[in-house]
Image: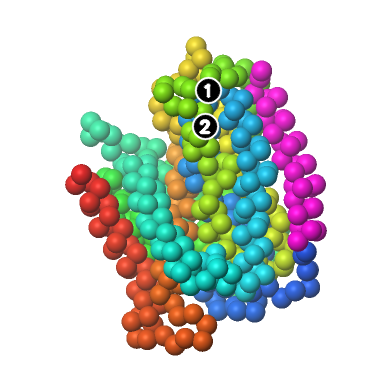
Amino acid sequence: MNGLTLVGIAMVVLVLAYLLYGRWLAKTWGIDPSAKTPAYRFEDGQDYVPASRFTVFSHQFNSITGAGPVTGPIIAAMFGWLPAFLWLLVGGVFFGAVQDFTALYASVKNDGKSMGLIIERYIGKTGRKLFLLFCWLFTLLVIAAFADILAGTFNGFTKDGGQNVPGAAAASISMIYIFAAMAFGIFMRHNKAGELTKFVIGAIIVALILWAGIQNPMYYDAKTWRYVVFAYCFIASVLPMWLLKQPRDYLSVFLLLGMILGGAIGIIIANPTIEMPMFAGWSVKNQPLFPMLFITIACGAVSGFHSLVSSGTSSKSISNETDMLPVGYGAMLVETLLGVVALVIACSAAQGGGLPTGTPFQIFGNAVGGFFTMFGLPAHVATCIIMMCVSALAMTTIDAVTRIGRMSLQEFFAPSEGESAGFAVKLISNNYVATVITLARLCEYMAVIRSC
């Protein structure tokens, strides 16, 4: 079996799933193009901010596409490429995309409410409290994990004290990204430029950011970058969606889609042979296929976190109900494609039926970086771009998770309909206070883990 065949099959299946099954779901549930969405009815310039279809798609895709679609399929390849490949397609089409679309649809049809508030409406207050508490604690785990990933990626020094140029360049690119995104957000907010104009300007900005970051690497250790990441999380949580999150995700999607496209084109040109066995057995390294396959491949097939993004942030930016299909269903299918590309790349790099040494991101990054050099990019530039793509996967998730964590805490203490809010509830409902509490609890949690 060669990699090109697997990628080709995946693309055909995913396109047909969108055109046939996705559209059937939208028709069955009912989409009203003339309905006034919550983004317009409750527009507050903070969380409820209507945006274009591509802007909301970019936010959804960037927020749900963390490390999972790359690491999960590569780890699951130990069972053979066929089980991982089948679960990516079956899970992505019938579980993951359906769940994301359902959560987005339910939220838009219920005034943009999050899953917690929707649960209260149909199940009760206790269900709402338990769900929101779980969501808040879950966000702490995700922020802690991704903060360490980013700090390690941005670390400007190697273990022996030498300079880590790719990491320092990725850090510089990421910092420039933040300020460039805010400037781009102001531009989009106050200029009625067409989608093509915004797309071209965005692509140019990304190219300039990459050039500037590679030319001016920032050398700081992991501890310093951990503090910087926490500061970024705070800013991303409290600033209006239009000022940072939406424009940053819009710009970041160029990187992530470019990474997928680069990997896919590289597979087409190289036409690699799959070196991993099709099926390695029902148990590998004392790990049973069931349920480990479904645990390792989560984000690429189905992840409950996606429903928090769909109902927590994306639903509050949908301008037209017709946008829900490409945002809710389509973004997940693109993430599934990333998982397939990662699986094919890793299995093609295998030797003697075993994966190369290194972390899943190192295996994936080295391969895609090699593809980029085939296009004429210098090796160090390709490495820096791949490192930035890895950090983009983490940063566009960690800022969304922090915002969702803040909102979950606010909604947990918020009074139900007809009840009045006391001083303490009003205080916690403040965006700054809720974010500080979330990040403070996170710092305490990470300190406890490091002491163990």
Could you tell me which secondary element the residue under label 1 belongs to? loop
Residue at 75 percent of width and 74 percent of height: 35
Q: Looking at the picture, how far across and down is residue 68, in whole percent?
A: 50, 41
Q: Looking at the picture, how far across and down is residue 162, in whole percent?
A: 26, 33
Task: Quarter of the image for the C terminus: give it.
Answer: top left
**Left or right: 273 as drawn, with respect to 26:** left
Local crowd size for mark 2, using a 10 Å CA cut-off: few (<14), some (14–19), many (≥20): few
Residue 3 position (above or below residue 264): above
**Left or right: 129 as drawn, with respect to 119:** left
Q: Are marks 2 and 1 in contact (CB under 8 Å)?
A: yes
Residue at 34 percent of width and 86 percent of height: 423
Give the quarter of the image for residue 368: top right
- Of residues 140 and 284, the one nearer the viewer is 284
Q: Looking at the picture, how far across and down is residue 373, in whole percent?
A: 54, 28
Give the quarter of the image for residue 247: bottom right
Could you tell me which secondary element the residue under label 2 belongs to? helix
The disc at residue 290 is 2
Highlighted range, magenta: 1-29
Q: Disc 1 designates what residue?
A: 282
Q: Amino acid at mark 1?
A: Trp
**Left or right: 17 as drawn, with respect to 407:** right
Q: Indicate which disc, 2 or 1, sits on the residue closer to the N terminus.
A: 1
